[in-house]
Image: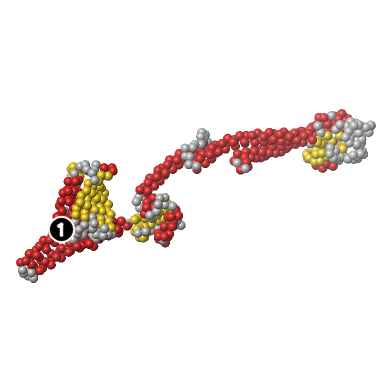
Amino acid sequence: MFKKRIAFKLTAGFVVIVLISMLTIGIFFIQMFRQYAFESREKIMLASARSISEVVAEYMQSNQITNGNSSNDLNGPMRGFGGYMRSLDTLTESKVWITDSQGNLARISGMGQGLGIGQGKGLGVGGGKGQGYFKSSEPLPKEAENVIQEVLSGEESVSESFSSVYNEATLTVGVPVIDSKHLIIGSVLLLSPVTGVTETLNRAVNILVISLLLALILAVALGIFYSLLFTRPLKAMNRTALEITRGNYSVRTGIERQDELGQLGNSLDLLASELGSTINQLFQEKGKLKDIISSISEGIIAFDPNHMPINVNSALAEIMNRPQPYLQEDVEKDLSNLDIEGQLARVMEEKKSLQMLKDWVGKKLMFTISPIMDNHGTVTGSVALVQDISESERLEQLRRDFIANVSHEFRTPLTVIHGSLEALLDGTVEKSEDIKRYHLRMLSETRGLERLVGDLLELSRLQSGKITINKELIHIHSLLADVLKSFQTIAEKKEIKIKYHAEQEVPPFRGDYDRLRQLFIIFLDNALKYSPQNTKVSVETSLLENNMLSIIIRDEGYGIAADELTRIWDRFYKVDKSRQGNSTGLGLAIAKHLIELHAGTVSVQSELEKGTLIEIKLPLV
C-alpha cells in the first residue's frame, strides 16, 4: 500500500536519481583520477629515465677521455658508477636497470661494484660480491625485454604489465642511452609497481563509497521531507475534492503557495465556490420547476429510453383515481393497462409529438407525448402530458344539448304560430270564434317565447356576473309568507296543502329581496307543478351553527331518479313528466346561480313516487 503512494514514488525517484548521478560522477572521477595518476607517474619516470640516460652518457664520455678508451661497452666505463646506482632506488622510487647496446644487463640500482653479471659477451665485473635484487645468473624479466627492444631501436617506451619480479602490475619505462655521436650505446629502464597508485585509487574508492552512503542517507531524508512537503497540499486537495463529492461546497483547501500547486489549490477552491453557486442555482431552478409541475392540474409522466416511468407529478394520481402517494408499481400497472408503449416507441423513433385519447374508469383522457432530446439530437426519453377532458367533453355535450334544446323550445311555438298564420291566410278558418281561438293560441305561444328569451337573458346575465344584488334587511318570515300567498290559488286548484313552519325566530339579514323571492318562487312552482292532487308541500326554516339559515322545501310529488339528480341543474334539462307543462327548463339553473350569488348552498334528496326535499342554506352574516 505504501508503495502506491506518491510520497514513496517521489522519495524513491529522488534517491535513485541521486544515486545514479553520484555513481556516474564517482566512476568518472575514479577513471579520471586513475588516468591522471598513471600519466603523472609515467611522466615522472620518463623524466627520471632521461636524466639517468644523460648522466650515464656523460659519465661514459668523460671516462673515455680520461682513460683513452673508445669502446661503447658499458661494463668497463661504468665500473666507477656504483655509488650513483645505489641511490637511484630512493631517488626515482623505481627499480633502475641499465643495459648495453646488445640488451645485456650492465647495472641495477641498489647494487655496488663487485657484482658479476655473467651474461652477454663475457664482460663481467670481478672483485667481490655486492647487494642487489638479481643474481648474476638471472636473465632480464620477460616484461622488460620487449621494452629494451623498442628502446634500442631508438624510441622511448612505456609499458604496463604484470611483473614476475613484484608479482603484481608494474609500470616499465625505457629510454635509450645516446652518446655524443648519436649512437645508441645502451638503455635505461625504470620499473615501478603500481601498488602506490592503486592504494591511492582504493583510498579514493573508499572515500567515494562512504560519500555515496552519506549522500544516500541525506537523499532519503531530503526525499522524504520534500515528498511530504509536496504531497501535503495534494492530500488537502484530495480531501477537498472528496468533501465536494459529498455535497459540501463550502470546504476550502487552505493552500497558500505561489507555485503550480498553489495555483491548482486556488483553482479547486474556485471550482468549489462556483460549483456550490451553480448547484444552488440548479436546486432553486429544480424547486421552481417542481413547484410549477406540482401546480399544473394536468398529469405529467417522464419516461426513460426503455419506456419505463421515472417521475410523475401529484396531479396524475387524482386523474388516475389513485391515492397519494402514487406508487411506482401502481404507475407501471396503470400505464400497462392503458397500453401506450407502442406510441412511446413511435414518438422516440420518429422524434415527433403525438396525441391520443384513452378511456379510463369513466373518464376521457388526452395523452400528449413528446420526445426528450439532448444537444446532439439524441432521444434520451419522453414525457407525456395527461389531461382529463371528461369535463370538456361534458361541457361540449351540454353545448350541443343546449343548442338542441333551444332549437326544440323555439321550434314548437314557432310551428304553432306558423301553422295558425297559414290557416288564417288561406281562409281555412272563417268563423270568428275559430279566428279568435287561433289568435289566442298564437298569443300564448308568443308569451312562452317571451318567457324563454327572458329566462335565457336572465341566466346569461347571472353566469357572466353582470347582475349585482341590492342588499337590504330582510325578514325571512315575511318573504316566505309573501311567496306562499302568491301560490295559494294554484295550490287550491290542485287541492295541495301548503304548510309553513319556523322552528325559532330568525333575525333579519341582508340580502336582495327580489332575487330571493324569485328563488323561492322557482322551487315552490316546481314543487306544486310536479305534485299530484291531494298532497302536501311544506316549508321549514331553522337556524344552524355558524350563523347559517336553513330553508327546507318538501313535497310529495313524483320524485327524481338518482341518476338524474346531478343533471337537474343543467340548462333545458327536463324529466319526462315535466314535458307536459310550459316550463322552459331553465328555472333550476337560474335558482342555483341566485343561491351562489348570495354565497349559499343547495342540496336535493329525492325518491321516485315519494317526493323531493330541497334544502337551501344562506349565511346570515
- The residue nearer to you, when weighing 504 against 432, is 504
| Residue 423, image x, y percentages | 10, 69
Q: Is residue 414 above or below residue 204?
A: below
Circle 1 packing at 10 Å, graded few (<14), some (14-19), many (20+), is: few
> What is the quadrant of residue 18 in the picture?
top right
| Residue 612, image x, y percentages | 25, 55
- The residue nearer to you, when weighing 235 against 130, is 235
Q: What residue type is labelled 1?
A: Lys
- The residue nearer to you, when weighing 486 against 353, is 486
Residue marked by disc 1:
493
Q: In this view, does 127 lie above or below 6?
A: above
| Residue 212, image x, y percentages | 69, 35
Residue 23 seen from this side: yes
Q: In this view, does 449 lie above or below 519?
A: below
Question: Which residue is at 83% across, 41% downward?
Answer: 143
In the image, is 589 to the left or to the right of 118? left
Quadrant containing the C terminus is top left
Q: Which type of secondary structure does the marked residue at label 1 adopt?
A: helix
Quadrant containing the N terminus is top right
- The residue nearer to you, when weighing 248 against 115, is 248
In the image, is 154 to the left or to the right of 459? right
User: Looking at the image, which residue sits at the far right?
Assistant: 127
In the image, is 540 to the left or to the right of 117? left
> What is the quadrant of residue 35 in the picture?
top right
> What is the quadrant of residue 545 in the picture?
top left
Tally the numbered discs.
1
Display colour scheme: secondary structure
In the image, is 336 to the left or to the right of 164? left
Question: Which residue is at 84% across, 37% downward?
Answer: 166
Residue 53 seen from this side: no
Question: Which residue is at 42% across, 52% downward?
Answer: 326
| Residue 574, image x, y percentages | 23, 60
